[in-house]
Amino acid sequence: MDRYAVIGNPVAHSKSPLIHADFAQQTEQQLSYEALLAPIDGFAATVADFRAAGGRGANVTLPFKLEAFALAERHSARALAAGAVNTLVFHDDHIFGDNTDGAGLVHDLSINLGLRLDGSRILLLGAGGAARGALLPLLKQGPARLCVANRSPEKADELAKLFRPHVIGTQLFASSFADLAGEQFDVVINATSASIAGEVPALPDGLYGSDALAYDMMYTRGDTAFMTTARDRGASRVADGLGMLVEQAAESFALWRGVRPDSAPVLERLRRQLST
Ligand code: NDP
């Protein structure tokens, strides 16, 4: 049986084994998928051991996405743009690295939530790994404007500069949180880690246009603090990142197995589990 795994530290909380087991059953693929805890200084050794034991591929989660990028010998364009890898494919003669996080986000926004990103005004909050991974897939949707805003604004500036060569027809710009005053957006994506501490980025009022969506990449039982605050401040719709999680997994599965699973029943099941 082909073996796959998610490698992280910590990793026990990961929903990936459950998601991929569901995908495998649904698509009738014979595979196993486990969670592997790598020591903080032992990511490469964990990958090597797993590959030697017959592993065919792996997902990589915090804090190893940059190390996975360094370990991969070939990369997809979106992994190169993200500078981080969340999916490894073990070929006989090389390791291929991809990044499916941004594609998962775009799939969730455009298919699951039915949003039209083409021509839209997008605010991306944060300038860490998740924001960087999201930028190229978001730009490919052809938004009219895309603003990257970060608590440390110089990092948002760096990201905007890095991605400007990829821009065709989108106004890509960077901002501090305070300088967003007077701007309006159709989609506001929280790619900061503030929600993990129950915090909310300090944003000015009036950012949400009519019918705007507030999207938090984080997910938890019930609404995150960002979602609650966004609703209070005029967002018509709010969503969390559970759909992104399932869709990035579906992208990885498709890369490994050549078949894209139906993510809807898996997302429904996870949502039910999270709410009980
Ligand atoms: P990083 O540590 O790389 O980046 C953290 C970012 O959050 C930085 O921009 C930092 O700003 C900002 N930040 C942290 N605390 C605050 C705060 N209190 N107020 C405002 N900004 C803050 O994290 P990642 O990019 O890897 O992850 C970001 C989030 O995305 C996490 O919640 C993670 O769980 C989620 N995620 C979800 C996925 C999914 O599938 N649903 C996939 C990947 C990530 P500064 O530069 O100023 O420090």
Image (cartoon, helix red, strand yellow):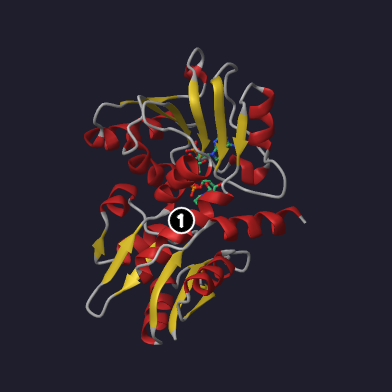
Query: Dot 1 lies on which element?
Result: helix
- Up-down relation of residue 143 to residue 47 (above or below): above
Rendering coords of residue 49 (x, y %): 41, 83
Q: For this view, does 67 lie left or right of residue 109?
A: left
Which image quarter holds the N terminus? bottom left
The residue that appears at 35% across and 43% down in the rendered structure is 137
Q: Is residue 266 left or right of residue 117?
A: right
Residue at image position (69%, 33%) is 228
Image quarter where the C terminus lies is: bottom right
Q: What x and y, as percent, mark residue 271? A: 66, 54
The residue carrying mark 1 has its beta carbon less than 8 Å from ligand 1: yes
Three-letter amino acid code at the position of disc 1? Gln
Residue at left 37%, top 58%?
85
Q: Nearer the viewer, residue 262 or 213?
A: 262
Which of 32/47 is in front? 32
Residue 238 versus residue 70 in the image, above or below: above
Asked if 77 appears above or below 21 in the picture, the reply is above
Mark 1 = which residue? 248
Q: Quadrant of residue 139?
A: top left
Q: Residue pushed farthest right?
A: 276
Residue 3's spot in the image, x, y percent? 44, 80
Above or below, comparing residue 183 to residue 135 in the picture: above
Question: Residue at 58% across / 65% down in the picture?
Answer: 10
